[in-house]
Amino acid sequence: MKIQFWGGVGTVTGSQHILKAEGKQLLLECGLFQGHRQEAEEINRHLPYDAKTINYCAVSHAHIDHIGNIPNLIKNGFRGQVLMTKPSVALSRVLLLDSAKIQEGDIKYLNKKRREKGEPPKEPIYTTADAEHSLTRLKGVGYAKANKLGPFTLYFHDAGHILGSALIDIEVAGKRILFTGDLGRKKLPIIRDPVQIREADILIMEATYGNRIHGDYEDVRNRLTEIINRIFQRKGRIIIPAFAVERAQEIVYNLKILRKENRIPDIPIFVDSPLASQITEVYRNSLAYLDQETSLLHDEHDGIFDFPGLRYIEDAYESKKLNSIDGPVIIISPSGMCEAGRVLHHLKHSVTDPKNLILIVSFQAEHTLGRRIIEKQPVIKILGEEFPLRAEVIAMDEFSAHADRNGLLEYVRNMNLARLQKVFLVHAEPPAAAAMIEPLKELGIPEIIIPTRSIEYEI
């Protein structure tokens, strides 16, 4: 039995891992790589394996770096179903169509430039038609139920990361392999805590924050209150680049509570994203998967993700009008890493003014605009133009939906360490993965591996 890693190693994006047993291949995740445009296009367009040889596919959750290349997989000859939880199917229906739309728009712009240079046109990695076809292959499964795929038996358990996220527990050839996907944190709002799996021979674990400790989530609302009131006093704008899935809903949830408690002023708040609006509707329709505190809040008149003063913006013209608002405003807009979407226009109109604030509430991968903002580079490029970064920048990693170093180690510590023989550290930049080696060794685990892309490992 072997495992081969094709993405999500040495980086936090583009997850793809192939488990091989008894002549069959199970693909865990099929995500899009996100980074330098040309490099990402090359990696995503050309699958590093023959899709026709993949027998089964299972996905832990509906983030684009875990599901985004499924249409390309099917386009290239994969004939099976893609297993994921039922909420992940609902989210994927929205996200994959949006991904195709973005690619078609990008390629249209690129081909205009290529025509001007006398170069032949290119095709998108996949089209809307490809994405629509891929949706027919998604199979929603329930938590804690056995799913037989040839020699593999899969169980999905709540990972506590986003709506529908799952740990994938695999029984094969007398071994038990646990793939964490993205492991969530305990005691976060909206989402339930991760399910603790105790028995496994092999652990494939994410280590995104393997070298960092999150701030205490209990202090999130206090920090938000201080930030919002301070920027309100100086009549500034607060721009929050937020992922359309989970982070936008979490920000809105916390702002609703602060409004309810009269801790922040009556400042206009906009969620500027058709995608975030659609995702929020999926959350509204998935109350059975949310935690008890959130379900209780839904009993109120306005529901969980709505309150007076909050508007969801879908129309492009209305989005542009937000940049002419005079006075304090909060704009929540994808993408979370500032690489695409309407947030670019809001940043363009906000980063040069020191009275404004860019509030970063998620992990920023290398080579993204979000990373350059969080590093407070003096000049940043937005939509091909250079701007001096004069706005205040604050990062709140308290919002992270990933377990931090302590959370990862606690999860492993609560497993049967006498049985656990091998840990593969994935979904992490090199320093974060390396920081996990010694503490895992101290737990007595015989072998800890930071895998290399394309290398096959015996398990």
Image (cartoon, rainbow, N blue to C red):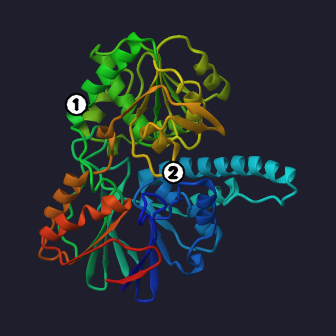
Identify the residue at horizontal 48%, vertical 54% (top origin): 89
Identify the residue at horizontal 13%, vertical 68% (top origin): 442
Q: Amino acid at mark 2?
A: His
Q: Nearer the viewer, residue 104 or 119?
A: 119
Sequence order check, earlier mark of 1 and 2: 1
Residue 59, percent across and down?
43, 63
Query: Which residue position is annotated with label 1?
Result: 219
**Is residue 218 visible from the viewing direction of this image?**
yes
Residue 429 placement: quadrant: bottom left
Q: Residue furthest bottom?
A: 22
Identify the residue at horizontal 38%, vertical 37% (top origin): 361
Quarter placement of the C terminus: bottom left
Query: Which residue position is annotated with label 2?
Result: 367
Q: Nearer the viewer, residue 444 or 86?
A: 444
Identify the residue at horizontal 45%, vertical 50% (top origin): 365
Residue 194, percent across and down?
25, 53
Q: Secondary structure at mark 2?
A: loop
Q: Nearer the viewer, residue 212 or 90?
A: 212
Q: Which numbered marker is on residue 171?
A: none
Q: Amino acid at mark 1?
A: Asp
Give the total number of marks visible in the rendering. 2
